[in-house]
Image (tube, rainbow, N blue to C red):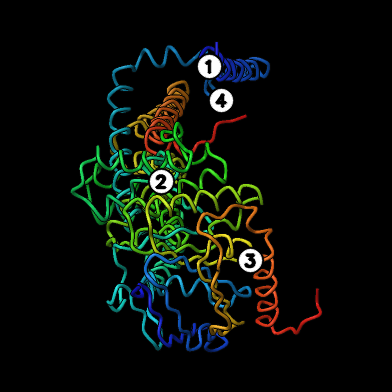
Amino acid sequence: MTNLIEIKGVTHAYRTKAGPLPVLDNLNVLVPEGEFCAVVGPSGCGKSTLTRLIAGLMKPDQGEVWLHGERVTSPRKTVGMAFQNPVLLEWRTIIDNVILPLEIVAPRMPQRDRQDRAMHLLEMVGLKGFENKRPSELSGGMRQRASLCRSIVHKPDVLIMDEPFGALDAFTREDLWQTMRDLRAAEPFTCVLITHDLRESVFLGDQVIVLSGRPARTQHVLDVDLPADRTIESLYTPEATDMLHLLRDQIRLAQGRDGGAH
Amino acid sequence: METLKKIAVPGLAIIAFLGLWELIVWVNDWPNYKMASPSDLPPAFSRYSGLFIEMGWQTLWRTVAGLGLAVIVGTLLGMAMGFSKIARDAVYPLLVGFNAIPKATLVPVIALIFIGQHDFNTVLMAFLISFFPIAVSVGIGLSTLEPEYRDILRSLGASKITIFRKIALPKTLPEFFGALKVSVTLAFIGTNLVEIVSPHGRGLGALFKSGETNGDYPLMFAVLIALAALGIVLYYAVVALERIFAGWAERPQS
């Protein structure tokens, strides 16, 4: 399998009033095509910076980001993004929100086809019947579902998600993990997921990358050896529990604290 | 029932206000040359009805023209301030300083520069007094746009113009209409200022002035009432536009 995303020796610092603030330090990440890569790490370690680099929204001070064998220097149409805030456009209906990327990426696509594509996705995430509602009429979980549809409506090669389920309650979050799993089974895409939730990273990820505290380096890479058709119950198996323990210890290390602080 | 209530409540409030006014004048036994009462107004309106329509139209179109100019210039200024920090730092003090100047002091200045151009002067003043809130609100609306909103389109390689048209512009509309509600009454004041102060003016302001010159108090008060009515019409015209273009921002009341 070829690597779809290659992050090679990326170092980046923000210029602040107090001087340069290094956030990424010689970071290396490889994500094979079709893989789901979950990235965890302490707060403020530069995870969001990583998403913006992959999306081509900013350039690293040093190092290179490659996507599909091409060096990323500017945004490209083959990327989808989802954030913690669903950022739906309040003046558009749900279906028109989902269509938005198609208006940019495929300006010549007939409106009929756009709507069919959007409806297909909305049906998959359980939003059928809500397509003509405004975002303000939907719950937080439903808004995030619509946001997910929008991020993959144009069939991106890479889906970049920055804590998309972070603001949801625990049960809604688990629902959305399963939605995510089903979406991936229906139409495969490569995914980078930034998260604070270790269970989420194990449920969704094929590999979990633990970043160190700021400035972030790759501290640990965990291959998740669970079957693809995971259920919430899979998280309570001994294998999954072991992985969660390992990740927890790695996070503690990353925070610069040694063990014992249970 | 709902619509009846919607008309009846403000209608009754206006009648109560006029009744109170009539009562105060009657209790104090003020003569017409001191304070006109509402019952003096209908005769004044009917006597000068032709003038009211003609002058009202003058005031109306010049106010709307000035406001239109304020919308264009204010939006452009707001865009400059919203997108560029340098423009914001440069323009803000100038704008605030200009806005702090009482506009009445500008009337003689304008009248001297553009002698006899009454229509132009009036539209100019309506514009000068009303563009500030629009510029500020558009500027703030654009500069406070959450970066994620921009990123969802920017990550697809959308141009700045596309991002503005599809996201920044509609997102700023509620703020824009909020400012337009302030600006519409300001523009109205600007128009009347020039009409009243400048000699040989036209419009309702000039009609007020002629009432004053002739000691016709009922006419003066009738003009004030006409101004109030016209102001209400303009304001609700903006409200109607807001409903059409930014109705999505209104949350259902529970």
Please name the residue shown 53% across and 21% down the image: B36
Q: Residues within 10 Å of mark 3 (few under 14, many from 20)?
A: some
What residue is disc 3 on? A198
What residue is disc 2 on? B173
SS for callout 2: helix
Vertical placement of A39 versus A168: above or below? below
Disc 3/disc 2 C-alpha distance (Å): 41 Å
SS for callout 3: helix
Q: Residues within 10 Å of mark 1 (few under 14, many from 20)?
A: some
What residue is disc 4 on? B34
What residue type is disc 3 on? Leu
What residue is disc 1 on? B38
Disc 2/disc 4 C-alpha distance (Å): 46 Å
- The answer to which of marks 2 and 4 sits earlier in the sequence is 4
- The answer for which chain carries disc 3 is A
Task: Say whether marks 3 and 4 touch (CB < 8 Å).
Answer: no
